[in-house]
Amino acid sequence: MKMFKNLLFAILGVLFLLPISVSANSATSVTLETYHFTNGDYLETILIQDALPRAATSTRSGQKTTYYKSASGTVLWSVTVRASFSYVYGKSSTCTSVTGSSASNSAAWKVSNASTSKSGNRATATATGYHYEKGQLLSSYTRSVSLSCDIYGSLS
């Protein structure tokens, strides 16, 4: 009976620790907005917040990506901003670093390199997608994506 009781406590102890380990190492992804064009194409913006460390911290990091998708849902091109922030809980927040990237997933689209900027608690990446057909430029679309951190460490 004593051996059974010890085994039961050991199993329960592992079960209580398991959810903490999984959630501490996972990132959160949230679809923030979708914008539809008249031709059926659309933009989808997704925010990924890095997992918070176990210890109390005053830094946050994450990334936000806007995907330009065809009406069928195929990603044609994207622009991403990745940033780190430091904050004093309830008082201030500042962007400490920013990187940007852009990518084309379609032969019909070319994308400029992403330019980046940061100001206060906001980081921004901007890129332009150029739509070609038979070597002729049909259209271009410039998109900026911004990531900010509030004074409580929440990214948006």
Image (cartoon, rainbow, N blue to C red):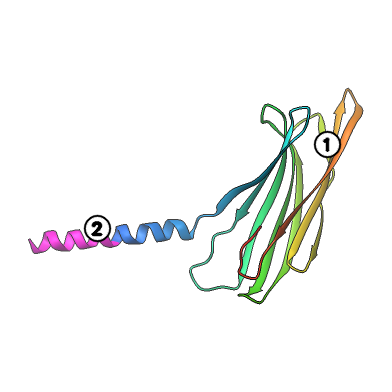
Look at the image and tell me in which quarter the N terminus lies: bottom left
> Is 79 left or right of 53, judged from the image as shown?
right
Give the Cα separation between the discs numbered 2 and 1.
Answer: 55 Å
Q: Which residue is mark 2?
A: 11
* Disc 2 residue type (three-letter): Ile
Q: Position of residue 20 (x, y in %)?
A: 41, 61
Determine if the magenta segment contains residue 6.
yes
Upstream in sequence: badge 2 or badge 1: 2
Q: Position of residue 40 (x, y in %)?
A: 74, 28
> Is 135 left or right of 120, judged from the image as shown?
right
The magenta stretch spans which residues?
A: 1-13
Determine if the magenta segment contains residue 33.
no
Residue in the picture at 9% in, 64% down: 2
Q: Main secondary structure of the magenta part?
A: helix
Q: Position of residue 132 (x, y in %)?
A: 87, 29
* Disc 1 residue type (three-letter): Lys
Helix, strand or loop under label 1 = strand
Which residue occupies the extreme top position in the image? 134
Image quarter of residue 137: top right
Image: 130 above or below 143: above
Instruction: Specify few, some or many for label 2: CA neighbours under 10 Å numbering under 14, 14-19, or 20 or more.
Output: few
Image: 151 above or below 42: below
Image quarter of residue 75: top right
Q: Which residue is mark 1?
A: 110
